[in-house]
């Protein structure tokens, strides 16, 4: 019994241990998509909660609510609502729309983190404050952390959406590619 000759593909990239179907297409499971959307929703709700607490505390301490906190609240609320709408579409019929909106919200959170970092006073020592004022002082940093988590969640979702859309587009006949 002679050993089988290896083809050029097997010599350069031995992919025989992968199932053929996983090499042909990328299609995440419904459970995976649901998990990503659920993670985005949880991140958005946590960001909304911490931003709301920060806004209330800042208004109580200083008499106003900063614009960057309001911007973060709007981004978090709208992003959470859109993620909740997308959670229904677990079969990714609208993969390009998912990729685009997730990219927009990732950029919006990134802008929020930049505005928050610029407008959060770095010279304020939260350790000198007493009692309930201390967590209100440090809360913007916690909110920025959750915004970073949301950036990663939306970035991951955007990558998945674009990858699925490109895979489907590459598998279409040439005449149908102009439609998509």
Image (tube, helix red, strand yellow):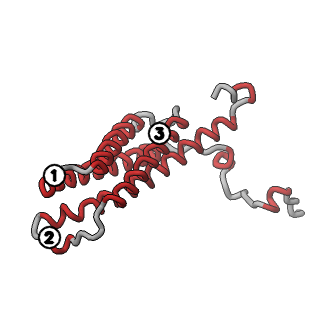
Residue 129 is labelled as: 2
Q: Quadrant of residue 135?
A: bottom left
Is there a contact, CB below 8 Å, between mark 2 and mark 1? no
Q: Is residue 11 left or right of residue 101?
A: right
Q: Nearer the viewer, mark 2 or mark 3?
A: 2
Q: Residue at x 30, y 57 (%)?
A: 143
Q: Position of residue 40 (x, y in %)?
A: 38, 48
Q: Secondary structure at mark 3?
A: helix
Q: Nearer the viewer, residue 31 or 49?
A: 49
Circle nearer the N terminus (2, 1): 1
Circle 1 residue? 59
Residue 101 is labelled as: 3
Q: Nearer the viewer, residue 91 or 178?
A: 178
Dot 2 alpha-carbon crowd within 10 angstroms: few under 14, some 14 to 19, many 20 or more: few
Q: Residue at x 36, y 60 (%)?
A: 118
Q: Position of residue 117 (x, y in %)?
A: 36, 60
Q: In which quadrant is the C terminus drawn? A: top right
Is there a contact, CB below 8 Å, between mark 2 and mark 3? no
């Amino acid at each position: 019994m002679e050993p089988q000759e290896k083809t050029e593909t097997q010599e350069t990239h031995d992919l025989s241990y992968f199932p053929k179907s996983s090499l042909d297409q990328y299609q995440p499971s419904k459970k995976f998509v649901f998990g990503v959307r659920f993670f985005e929703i949880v991140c958005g709700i946590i960001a909304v909660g911490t931003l709301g607490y920060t806004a209330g505390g800042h208004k109580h301490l200083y008499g106003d609510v900063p614009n960057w906190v309001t911007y973060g609240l709007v981004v978090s609320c709208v992003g959470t609502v859109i993620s909740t709408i997308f959670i229904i579409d677990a079969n990714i019929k609208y993969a390009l729309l998912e990729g685009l909106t997730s990219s927009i919200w990732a950029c919006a959170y990134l802008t929020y983190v930049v505005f928050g970092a610029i407008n959060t006073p770095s010279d304020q020592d939260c350790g000198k404050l007493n009692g309930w004022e201390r967590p209100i002082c440090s809360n913007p940093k916690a909110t920025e952390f959750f915004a970073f988590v949301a950036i990663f969640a939306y970035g991951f979702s955007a990558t998945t959406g674009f990858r699925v859309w490109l895979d489907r587009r590459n598998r279409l006949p040439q005449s149908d590619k102009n439609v998509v």
